[in-house]
């Protein structure tokens, strides 16, 4: 078992694809789990957890996370760090871009150290509750409209996480 667990929920496959890219960037030091199939006992011993979700509708959490998040929020987070990435559509849902990140954050922020925040620079959208004082609660990605920026954003984010996961 590695020190890092990547948990993702996906409806169309985009979040799974990004989660696998994150796993590759950690070069064999991260295990990956679909929240639809994972048990809490399988992830309890990980020190670092990366949460990946998509934003559906107007700021809603992906369905598999809807069922898993309440249980996940109850694990013992002592000594753990969590990072969040969220997919969204910055054009069609410009006023709720990547807001599933905020849903996850709100559920866990008082239980665990949340790391991996990124500055709100280079994103095109109108509004999001997942931004506070010019900083995202994690990494927002838009695989619909800004897919050409995903690789660079992921590389920078994972490098940041490697420094925070110590």
Image: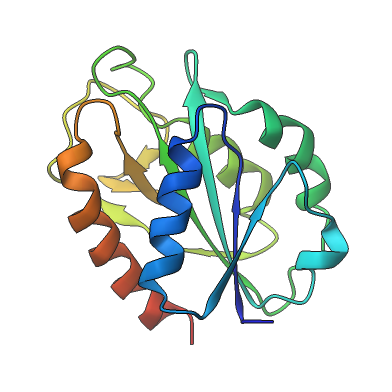
Q: Quadrant of the N terminus?
A: bottom right
Tell me residue 20's x, y (percent). 46, 57
Image quarter of residue 118:
bottom left
- 111 vs 16, nearest the viewer: 16
Q: Quadrant of residue 125?
A: top left
Q: Give 70 or 132, whichever is nearer the viewer.
A: 70
Q: Is residue 48 above or below residue 19?
A: below
Q: Position of residue 38 (x, y in %)?
A: 78, 53
Identify whether 30 is placed above or below 146.
below
Whole-percent x and y of residue 58? 47, 14
Quadrant in which residue 11 is drawn = top right
- Residue 28 in view (yes/no): yes
Left or right of 74? Residue 80 is left
What's the residue at 83%, 54% (across, down)? 74
Q: Which of the pair 49/138 is nearer the observer?
A: 49
Please say if 79 is above or below 76: below
Q: Which residue is drawn at the image coordinates 40% and 36% (left, top)?
A: 87
Q: Is residue 120 visible?
A: no
Scheme by which the image is coloured: rainbow
Left or right: 30 in relation to 76: left
């Amino acid at each position: 078992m590695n020190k890092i667990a990547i948990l993702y929920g996906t409806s169309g496959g985009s979040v799974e694809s990004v989660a696998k890219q994150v796993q590759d960037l950690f070069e064999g030091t991260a295990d990956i789990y679909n929240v639809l199939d994972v048990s809490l006992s399988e992830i309890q011993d990980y020190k670092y957890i990366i949460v990946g979700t998509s934003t559906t509708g107007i700021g809603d959490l992906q369905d598999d996370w809807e069922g898993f998040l309440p249980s996940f929020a109850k694990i013992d987070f002592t000594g753990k760090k969590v990072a969040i990435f969220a997919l969204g559509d910055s054009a069609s849902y410009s006023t709720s871009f990547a807001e599933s990140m905020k849903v996850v954050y709100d559920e866990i922020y008082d239980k665990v150290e949340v790391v991996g925040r990124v500055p709100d620079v280079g994103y095109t959208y109108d509004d999001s509750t997942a931004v506070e004082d010019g900083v995202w609660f994690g990494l927002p990605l838009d695989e619909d409209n800004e897919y050409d920026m995903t690789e660079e954003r992921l590389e920078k984010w994972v490098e940041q996480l490697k420094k925070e996961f110590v």
